[in-house]
Amino acid sequence: MVLSQTPMSTPHLPLSGLQARPPWQHEAPVALLPHVLRLTAPNPGLMTGPGTNSYLVGSAATGWLVLDPGPLEPDHIDRLWQAAGGDIRLIVCTHSHADHAPAARPLQTLCTKRSGHTPPVLGLPSAPTANAASQFSPDRVLADGETLALHDAAGRVSFSLQVIHTPGHAANHLCLLLADGPGAGLLFSGDHILNGSTTVINPPDGDMTNYLDALDALDAACVRLGLGYILPAHGHVMDQARTVIARLKAHRLAREAKVQAAMQARPEGTLDDWVALAYDDVPSAIWPVAKRSLQAHVERLQALRHANR
Ligand SMILES: [Zn+2]
């Protein structure tokens, strides 16, 4: 789930090779790189931007990893199978929201039926705080820091993706990191970092302090693995990954300062009073959704105040 209309970064053109801004299409995948395909689900909207980006990583020699198979859209599920030439080895969900994970099991079933091979569904189980539409239990739980590998016919590792836990947008959110040479690595950011919109932090499954801490962890990963590009679940590729992360964190903290000022100006106020002050730069039609992130800021500020007592 995303909150549109608050652009926080300008897309840049790629350094080389990477097709950063191919036009949106749902019918067929776009090769961002020879080994990275993007297939956008036909679910565009206020909360999903151009639609959910499913990514495929791999090659004909290794088979493919599918990241975020998306919503329950039979055509999209079929296109994912086609895009992988029928050879899907792993299915990974960044988190369990309705625009990301529901296609995982039908895609797995399709693979079994058509190819006789059953790829595991991987990710983190939904937390007790997740709502009814976001229940999820993977075949295997991915550990923070573990590596997923795709091998060629000789058993050599051709692609390896590191898992990093990033709670905040959802308690069971993770990102995948593909080291691809200095500055050329890719961060598959799910909904933790979006292009053209700011992700909603919806308590209790969402948590603002976890969200900000995970941004720091992603920045450290960018340095460690030479990640230069961010591939979000909604919107185009972004380059200058560390700059995007720094800008996003500054945006959140600037919003938090406005929330704090609103709470000080109206100490007896409600969320409705504070949203009008703290989100006065956002159209009021967005306020019902903004109130969820506002709630997350309020809870974080109260926790910080409690800790400083
Ligand atoms: Zn999403």
Image (cartoon, helix red, strand yellow):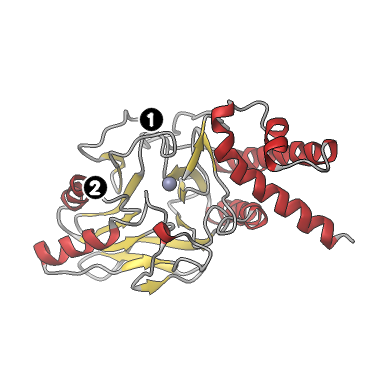
Residue placed most toward the observer, 272 or 253: 272
**Residue at horizontal 17 percent and vertical 50 percent from the top:** 78
**Residue at horizontal 49 percent and vertical 58 percent from the top:** 173
Q: CB of mark 1 within 8 Å of CB of mark 2?
A: no
**Is residue 244 positioned above or below 95 on the image?**
above
**Residue at horizontal 68 percent and vertical 36 percent from the top:** 275
Instruction: Give the label, 1 or 2, closer to the camera.
Output: 2
Left or right: 76 in relation to 49: left
Identify the residue at the far bottom of this view. 140
**Which quadrant of the structure image shows residue 24?**
top left
Q: Label 2, on which residue? A: 73
Q: Amino acid at mark 1?
A: Arg
Residue placed most toward the observer, 120 or 290: 290
- Mark 1 lies on a secondary structure that is loop
Residue 292 in the image, given as x and y percentages of width and height: 59, 46
Q: Is residue 62 visible?
A: no
Left or right: 48 in relation to 81: right
**Is residue 261 positioned above or below 111 on the image?**
above
Q: Earlier in the sequence, mark 1 or mark 2?
A: 1
Residue 28 in the image, given as x and y percentages of width and height: 21, 38
Residue placed most toward the observer, 300 or 221: 300
What distance separates the C-alpha of mark 1 from that of mark 2? Answer: 24 Å
- Mark 2 lies on a secondary structure that is loop
Q: Is mark 1 within 8 Å of ligand 1?
A: no
Q: Mark number for residue 21? A: 1
